[in-house]
């Protein structure tokens, strides 16, 4: 049961960091947002590679990754989280929020003219995608123990 909460917490923490990042950088245009995302990911990658010299935690081994993660992912858990993500995404796409996202994807100007808040929808899509990426990362980290 602790594994379930660890994976959900991985998604939640990724969601919160994506929200903080998105609030700051979504004011940029589309190309500049991509450049800012790439630059931020390079900074985080460099910090994590050098974390054994920067952070005082013995579990952080820099480029070798974190040690001490138990291998708890089984086929049941991987399948369970996959089914949950598929169900959540299917329901989200067919909801009003999903229709707004489709409208923003197809034509931002028309969506804005229809009264849809384009910036909030983009931020929400970014945060939801990050939540699912965090869940996938949590399952994978417990699969390889690294």
Image (spheres, rainbow, N blue to C red):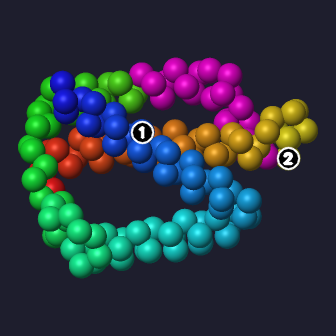
Specify whether 8 is left or right of 12. Answer: left
Q: Give the dominant element type of the magenta stretch: helix, strand or loop.
A: helix
Does the image show residue 17?
A: yes
Q: Quadrant of the N terminus?
A: top left
Query: Looking at the image, how many numbered discs can be counted on the residues?
Result: 2
Specify whether 13 is left or right of 62. Answer: right
Give the percent coordinates (x, y) of residue 86: 40, 27
Does the image show residue 106?
A: no
Give me the residue at 79% from left, 46% from top. Answer: 108
Which is nearer the eye, 84 or 20? 20
**Does the magenta segment cover residue 77?**
no
**Does the magenta segment cover residue 101?**
yes
Which residue is label 1 attached to? Answer: 12
Q: Quadrant of the C terminus?
A: bottom left
Specify whether 99 is left or right of 49. Answer: right
Q: Secondary structure at mark 2?
A: helix
Q: Which stretch appears magenta?
A: 87-108
Q: Nearer the viewer, mark 2 or mark 1?
A: 1
Relative height, residue 79 to residue 139 (above, below):
above
Relative height, residue 88 to residue 120 (above, below):
above
Which is nearer the eye, 31 or 39? 39
Residue positioned most to the front? 56
Give me the residue at 57% from left, 57% from top. Answer: 21
| Distance CA(mark 2)–CA(mark 1) | 32 Å
Which residue is label 2 attached to? Answer: 109
Give me the residue at 61% from left, 40% from top. Answer: 124
């Amino acid at each position: 049961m602790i594994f379930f909460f660890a994976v959900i917490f991985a998604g939640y923490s990724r969601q919160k960091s994506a929200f903080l990042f998105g609030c700051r950088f979504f004011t940029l245009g589309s190309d500049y947002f991509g450049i800012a995302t790439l630059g931020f990911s390079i900074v985080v990658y460099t910090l994590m590679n050098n974390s054994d010299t920067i952070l005082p935690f013995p579990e952080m081994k820099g480029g070798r990754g974190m040690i001490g993660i138990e291998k708890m992912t089984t086929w049941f858990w991987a399948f369970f989280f996959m089914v949950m993500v598929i169900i959540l995404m299917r329901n989200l796409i067919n909801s009003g929020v999903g229709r707004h996202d489709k409208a923003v994807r197809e034509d931002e100007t028309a969506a804005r003219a229809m009264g849809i808040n384009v910036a909030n929808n983009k931020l929400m899509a970014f945060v939801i995608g990050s939540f699912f990426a965090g869940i996938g990362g949590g399952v994978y980290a417990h699969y390889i123990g690294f």
